Amino acid sequence: MAGSLRALRRRIRSTQSTKKIFSAQELIAGARIVRAQARVEASKPYAREITRVLSALAGSASLDHPLLTERTDARRVAVLVITSDRGFAGSYNVNVLRRTEELLGLLRNEGKEPVLYVVGRKGETYYRFRDRDFADSWTGFSEQPNYSDAQEVGSTLIDAFTAGEDDDIADAGDPRGAGADGILGVDELHIVYTEFRSLLSQVPVAKRMAPLVVEEVDEFRDERDEPQRTSEVPTSYEFEPSAEALLDALLPKYVTTRIYAAMLEAAASESASRRRAMKSASDNAEELAKNLARQANQARQAEITQEISEIVGGADALVSAGSDD
Amino acid sequence: MATLQVELVAVEKMIWSGEASMVIARTTEGELGVLPGHAPLLGELAPGGVVRIRPESGEDLVVAAHGGFLSVTERGVSILAETAEISTDIDVERAREALRRAEQDGDDPDALAAARRAQSRLRAAGQDA
């Protein structure tokens, strides 16, 4: 009996200390959501401006830039998955990885070969554990991504995309069809990340980043442009350097900006999921500690009752032994 | 007097916005001054360059802007930069250190870009680069 009481007390202690960890994590995640949301907001002016510049350019430059042209025989497709570095975030990673699997299935059905690029340690271990190949991975910044991280990812993807431009051109030298540059590139860029809709709802989404669709650019067009656009002739810009050269410089930056925006949203979603998971974990721990305390009290009382009855029994025995004399 | 509505935006945040009487920048094609009423223009900022914003009153705002674009419309001027620092926030010692390191690293593109960034930071802070 005494043993079970000791065991119960030990379990209560350990439950309480894990609860402390959970609630600390919950608080940290809560503070991070606020910061992540602020960063999402702070990055919006740039996204708005670059989109406006791009729409202005789209009207003036010829749109045959590789990042804008649909490739007729898209064969290899890059899929960028954004996961978290740490666990403790409930179903966050599971959801985004499941969405990725759906996309991969879809792409395979279309006869394309998906190539994975992974952000976040969780995604990396997921694919490594399953012995699945991925082309590249980046870790260590999922909670607080910087623009330089997005640049690193972006330049890798854009390089792969540019390298894919000449793939499949009849070149007998390379059986993989890597084209003149000998590098096997990709023909499309997709991104899977978790969209932050609200504190309670984060949805994994898959989007195509390249080739860019020009309509997509229109949809971002600043409402400030509208009145003027309808009333006057479209503004004719001077370009320094030429419109084509500007487009060349701008489009990769635009893609990087979108990757950065996705990373920021994913970071906010990650913190929100983590806070929710940690909240229910600490609630559960509290419930468990309460039940255990109840059991422990019962055990303690049973022990006391037993001691009393042992003492009483012993005294009785002594008394009756004494009366015999 | 007519003024320009100027917005200076870096990727991570809006750095400065307000009224100005003139903006001076260097594009890849050459030095350029924008006054109110300038024709619409899109330009790529030269690497290692510095942007000056002259407010209606007070001192010029000197900014080290890297990897940026300049867009002039009827409504005003927006300067888009991957990173941008206002001269008063620049740590000259650190910029010098960064330049020294980048120059030691030699010719690879990353080091060159880092050197350009450091140079423009120094120039914006009014130092020799």
Image (spheres, rainbow, N blue to C red):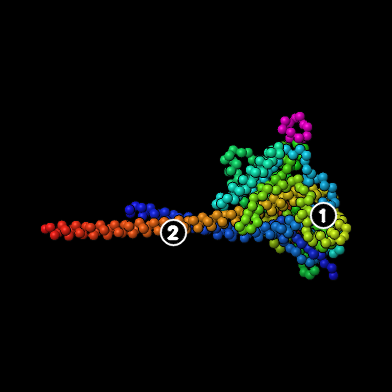
The majority secondary structure of the magenta stretch comes to loop
Q: What residue type is labelled 2?
A: Lys
**Identity, as a three-letter code, of the amino acid under mark 1:** Ala
- Residue drawn where x is 31% and y is 57% of the image: A303
- Is residue A237 rendered to the left or right of residue A106? right
Q: In which quarter of the image is the C terminus of chain B?
A: bottom right
> Does the rendering let one see residue A21?
no
* Residue A91 image offset from top left, x and y in percent: 58, 50
Q: Indicate whether A139 appears above or below B128.
A: above
Please tell me which residue is depicted at 83% across the width and 62% down the height of the picture.
Answer: A227
Q: Are the residues at dot 2 and dot 1 in contact (C-beta closer than 8 Å)? A: no
- The residue indicated by pointer 2 is A290
Chain hosting mark 1: A
Report whether B93 appears left or right of A282. right
A82 magenta-colored: no
The magenta region covers A168-180
Q: Is residue A126 above or below residue A197?
A: above
Give the image location of residue A272, x and y in percent: 60, 56
